[in-house]
Amino acid sequence: MVDKSHIKHFCSIVGEENVKSDKAHLIAYCYDATRDRFEPDAVVFPRDEQEVSDILKYCNEHKIVIVPRGAGSGFTGGALPASGGIILSLERHMNQLLEIDMQNMVAVVQPGLVNMSLQKAAEEVGLFYPPDPASEEYSTLGGNVSENAGGMRAAKYGITKDYVMALRAVLPNGDIIQAGKKTIKDVAGYNIAGILTASEGTLAVITEITLKLIPKPKHKQTYMGIFPDVTSAMNAVFKSLASGANPVAMEFLDSLVIKALKQKLGVNLPESAGAVLVGDVDGNLTDEVKFQLETLEVSFKENGATDFIIARDETHAKELWYARRNASPSITIYGNKKLNEDISVPRSKLPIALEKIYAIGDKYGLTVPCFGHSGDGNIHVNVMVKDKNDPKQLEDGHKAIEEIFKLVVDMGGTLSGEHGIGTAKAAYMNIAFSEAEMNLFKNIKKAFDPNNILNPNKMGL
Amino acid sequence: MVDKSHIKHFCSIVGEENVKSDKAHLIAYCYDATRDRFEPDAVVFPRDEQEVSDILKYCNEHKIVIVPRGAGSGFTGGALPASGGIILSLERHMNQLLEIDMQNMVAVVQPGLVNMSLQKAAEEVGLFYPPDPASEEYSTLGGNVSENAGGMRAAKYGITKDYVMALRAVLPNGDIIQAGKKTIKDVAGYNIAGILTASEGTLAVITEITLKLIPKPKHKQTYMGIFPDVTSAMNAVFKSLASGANPVAMEFLDSLVIKALKQKLGVNLPESAGAVLVGDVDGNLTDEVKFQLETLEVSFKENGATDFIIARDETHAKELWYARRNASPSITIYGNKKLNEDISVPRSKLPIALEKIYAIGDKYGLTVPCFGHSGDGNIHVNVMVKDKNDPKQLEDGHKAIEEIFKLVVDMGGTLSGEHGIGTAKAAYMNIAFSEAEMNLFKNIKKAFDPNNILNPNKMGL
């Protein structure tokens, strides 16, 4: 437990104004995008890396649990103080864009910088930071790295880990380390930046991030394919990509989502639409964009598409994207509790995976609308519970989720494509990992954090 | 030490014909591409993953040192049994291409498969495996992953780590693990595949590799830029790339290499050439290739290029590449001992880095021809010792190398862009890493290998 002497010591490190333990602050820092709530014992706002080091060193000596936090927008409890302790909040002071190095096409940022701030700063100088999680307007880059955030553009441009060149971080014992360089190639020493990415704040506190930028493609165009059913759309996904198409995004809506969009938001989609694929293509030449659109159209129609729409202009593009962007809020017509899991399978398995996911829903009498990043095999599966106050329905929902996870892992897929494990999926880790693999995770955790003070008891560890 | 009872036990696992301890075999497995020689106590050729597991389990129980080995073509001693023990040779039996999954654009291979075999198999079905280390004709993919091999195409396509989707591996205690999936996104659990890549066979024995493939670009063209001096060429490197050019390769030859090529091999290069950049551009449309060439030509000429040559045909392209491909053998005119280091700096630092590297050479009266992968900042720096039998010259060579490493690290660069650390660079790790960072490496090594049996005493650990 954190007592007054500890609070006093934190004040001596960061200043009184940067330590909060009043009820309002404890409540303000008790949540994330899950519905779980855990109040910390205190919230500490370090002003720089040295202060982070001093805090960790003290916590390590006094065995005080510490949970690093950015915007608290995660979906799996990664930033929740589920075992108590203090919140180390990096979004108040350590939120600066330190450098955009145009000569090397690299950005150096502090962990509390919001994703969109970097995207905008890069665009202003003709560069591009592709990872665009749905939370891009408020999630921080420290959180993005810690969860290895994905997004819509992963089909062509990959995910956060593909852009992390180097990290500075503080180990639980207070040691400050540099991992990686501002160089494309670096094979000296173990790949620490690689293992810190996606480690959910359990191994070290990231204090500085060096990210790769790329030249901004000059042209972009939005497309939409209309399919009679989910299976034909899912076949079109992997067949079009294997045929050489390289779209920025290829997002998917199933018939339940389409119905919800029409019913709740009056979205205008063709009567015949049993499934939709929507996305962008880009390139430096208009001919490249044209080539991409032609490749997609041919492949979509070979796989049963009844229509292939190309946006006439920016406004039309926004209209086409509107359906995808509102998929999540629309499906509340099916229930007041959404069990949303971001499973991922090899793309060729999407048709059969979705067929079986719907069958699991049917078995429990639950509606399971699905949408998401089909271009990279990552689908948001939403098990809808009509009435969350009915324990039977809720229990069935969780049973369905467990069956879906088992199915996905059997198909060579993963529990999480982008949201992470945290507390929310910790109970399912044994579905995906053997005892040997879990033991290895535990040994790695111990190598970084022998006293288990840093974001403990997450990820099933 | 390995005694007769151990040999007998290995025979019981893999069969007598797959355990060798005769002098001929010990000599055959004592070398790599360094000039160092260390004879193992025995060579064992496992036939499958279970045998690898049985061998490791036994070695762990009996504290027998074990060194995994592919083709033994490494430049830094990674596969050398520098502390004795047995060689676990994966190139005899575990060398199969298990699958090319065209639907998901993924290859699954055993660690002993030669890089070029995969490249060819991928090309036959219209796909592309970009990493192309100079050893591509004989180095194995297990070795490529363990060293995180680079190559000429890294400027556009990245390096081995960018293609590793999943690994199967055996831990020192014999546990078999799976790390990663055949999915683009996977954020469940720690990124074990990430830390095994570039770990130089010190953490686990890789038994299966899942690699990303991409569609083979339809068109390719070779270019060469002629520059009056190294500084203008190095400026052209980072300025052309920052201006949006995205060449597959941008390779560099300095004036010493050019002189050696002319003198030793009669290579035809312009009288005025003080430095050369040579490479390929590619794309799915001829217009993309044209756009890339135009972008390069404009930027090269803005930075002082006196000539920009575009290959007329395949034969001409081979002629242009001939100079680069023969850089390494040509420079032996400068001495009979080559201290070849593969340093890497942020690209914008190349002009000043090279200037200072030549100055270090001058200080010791040593010729330092440089060439390599300038497009990704990775340069092969060759400190030439005229007479390797003169201890003073050799000592000066090593002093120069140490100064070069210090310079490079001060400039934000790395000891090794692609060769690794192994035994050859172990003594220099303290230049690049703090005590805290080295301690972390040691703790990670211990987490995987508490008995320190797997390729011990490498990487300065």
Image (tube, coloured by chain):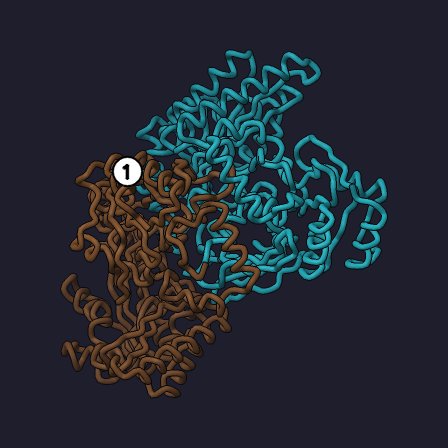
Chain colours: A brown, B cyan
Report the side of A30 relative to B131 (left or right): left
Q: Give the total number of marks visible in the rendering.
A: 1
Judge whether A147 appears above or below A278 on screen.
above
Q: Residue at x 68, y 58 (%)?
A: B53
Crowd around label 1: few <14 · some 14–19 · many ≥20 (10 Å): some
Judge whether A81 appears above or below B356 on screen.
below
Q: Quadrant of the C terminus of chain A?
A: bottom left
Task: Give the letter of the chain under mark 1.
Answer: A
- Reading the image, the residue beneath label 1 is A9
Report if residue A219 is visible in the image. no
Of B452 and A192, nearer the camera is: B452
Q: Residue A309: name its quadrant.
A: bottom left
Of B74 and B20, nearer the camera is: B20
Report if residue B202 is visible in the image. yes
Q: Residue at x 45, y 23 (%)?
A: B407
Q: Residue A415: name its quadrant.
A: bottom left
Q: Residue A375: name its quadrant.
A: bottom left
Q: Residue at x 69, y 56 (%)?
A: B52
Report the side of B7 relative to A94 (left or right): right
Which x, y percent locates residue A407?
A: 46, 76
Of A77 and A262, nearer the camera is: A77
Which x, y percent locates residue B79?
A: 66, 41
Which x, y percent locates residue A32?
A: 26, 60
Judge whether B461 appears above or below A429 on screen.
above
